[in-house]
Image (cartoon, rainbow, N blue to C red):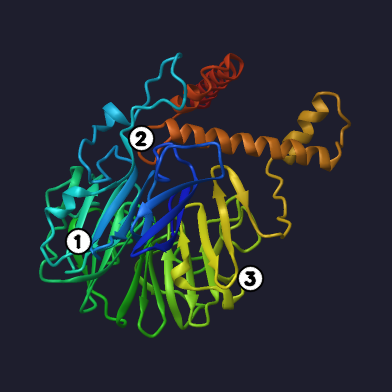
Amino acid sequence: MGAGVRHALVSTHSLSGDRFESHLAGFGLNRCQQLGKKGSGTPSIATNVSGKVLQIACGREHSAMVVEKKDKSKVVMVCGSNSYGQLGIGDAHRLQEAAIPKQTAELEQEEYLIPASGLVEVAALKDMLRSDEMPVRVQCGMDHTVILTSLGRVFAMGWGSDGQLGAGPDSTVCHDRPVQVFGLDKAPIVDISSSTDFTLALSADGRLFYWGNAEYGQCMIGKKIDQVLAPLEIPFTDGTIVKIAAGGCHALVLLSDGRVYGCGYGAIGMGADTASSLTPSLVKGISDIGHIAASTDRCLALDSQNNVYSWGLGNHAGRLGNGTVFSNLYAPTRLDISPKHVQPAFMALGNDIALEIHVGRPSLCIAGIMDEQVETTNKQFPRHKLFSRELALLMYGFGDSISPLPESVDVLEDILVDFINSTCVQAATVSGRKNKILVEDFKFILRKDPKKLARVEELLAMNKEIEVARTLF
């Protein structure tokens, strides 16, 4: 299974005669066919794959997987957005041509010029592999893909402006076909990790390498670097690294003795008083850890008894899995999940999604938000009443009592929060800019609602007047 920003894939397989047939179930957003093929309006999309799916990774709007064929050869198959060449199949258009929708009144929201594809093989990879070499692992960043081979070589494709592809000291360009990561020839790699805009790699002799964006100090060398364009070996002397996890602004490493070290900014798990660390620091409160995972701004860890620990930034969907919403966990917190049903191989962590297969029971646990549909535990989440006071005053202004019923205020707040979430998701969808939503994106999605658009224009004008007035004092 694999989980990305707003989508996830789960694979099962069956034996038909002498060959395997895999069955993909996709959940969440599917604007660019990142679930494997076109389709929308249903909770899930099913896709058949000829062969045995061994591993899956998901990015912002693309997916990749390693598939074993009938003859035991292995290939990488991909689907979704190819705006930056992250599928490795060529024909990636430039951003200004492809990823920004035509903002015309006649165009429906679903019609974009983003190049995308259903599930296809990365054929160009075959020409780069040796006769005795096969892909064994894939990782998806936001808009790039990293491939590890059986000989310990690493290839990458897609967005490369911050060195995400590790293509060399002077390379910040995108590649729409796989390129070999620079400078790792003498260090056979056994593991890779990427979820946003940087990659961690672990060599067979325990050395740690880093490339990509490092502006938050997550590169673990005691300082912030804007871009690491070629793999940088990270000195680490506190123990033997056995597993790695690349998050958004933070990175984790797991040592052979079960200790976890974190570095960077945000979800480093070191308490509310420590928001950042430029050097690897011990994550306290957990021990005997056997598995770690990191995403944009949160982490998971499993100990040897399969107890699950979570920390990071919460949201309205309860994605941290601790039974609360809109609250952060600054240190590892054990989740209420029975260890006997947990196996590390059956877990996946995405930006707003966490998946877990309950072993021994035919069920899939989902924590977080997927395509604006929230699934949580049966616990009743406490309200944080973000807008209760303002809504009560608004109701009073429109003729209600001076103290409206709390239940009435709650209903209005639910409607307001849902509208804000939905509008932000739509604005992010039409935005062609990386990790940024502009006012123009909101105006574009409201273009067919003259009343709302006029109100936005009025508020923007009012804001400018306030800014001018402030300069006079």
Helix, strand or loop status at disc 3 = loop
Please give the residue where the numbered disc 2 appears in the rendered image. Answer: 433
Specify the quadrant of the image occupied by residue 423: top right
Using residue 227 as the reference point, say whether residue 402 is left or right of it: right
Contact between labelled residues 1 and 3, with CB atoms less than 8 Å apart: no
Q: Is 163 in front, or is 308?
A: 308
Amino acid under disc 3: Asp
Disc 2/disc 1 C-alpha distance (Å) = 28 Å
Image quarter of residue 397: top right
Q: Which residue occupies the extreme right position in the image?
A: 401
| First in residue order: circle 2 vs circle 1 | 1
Judging by the rendered image, the residue that carries numbered circle 1 is: 154
Q: Earlier in the sequence, mark 2 or mark 3?
A: 3
Residue 44: image location, x then y, percent = 53, 46
Alpha carbon distance from label 3 to label 1: 38 Å
Image coordinates of residue 358 in percent, x first then y, are 57, 68
Q: How dense is the environment of label 3, judged by Cα within 10 Å: few (below 14), some, or many (20 and up)?
A: few
> How busy is the neighbourhood of tag 2: few (under 14 within 10 Å), some, or many (20 plus)?
some
Find numbered disc 1 in the image and state the secondary structure of the residue it sits on: strand
Q: Position of residue 171 (x, y in %)?
A: 14, 47
- The residue that mark 3 highlights is 336
Amino acid beneath label 1 = Val
Q: Nearer the viewer, mark 2 or mark 1?
A: 1
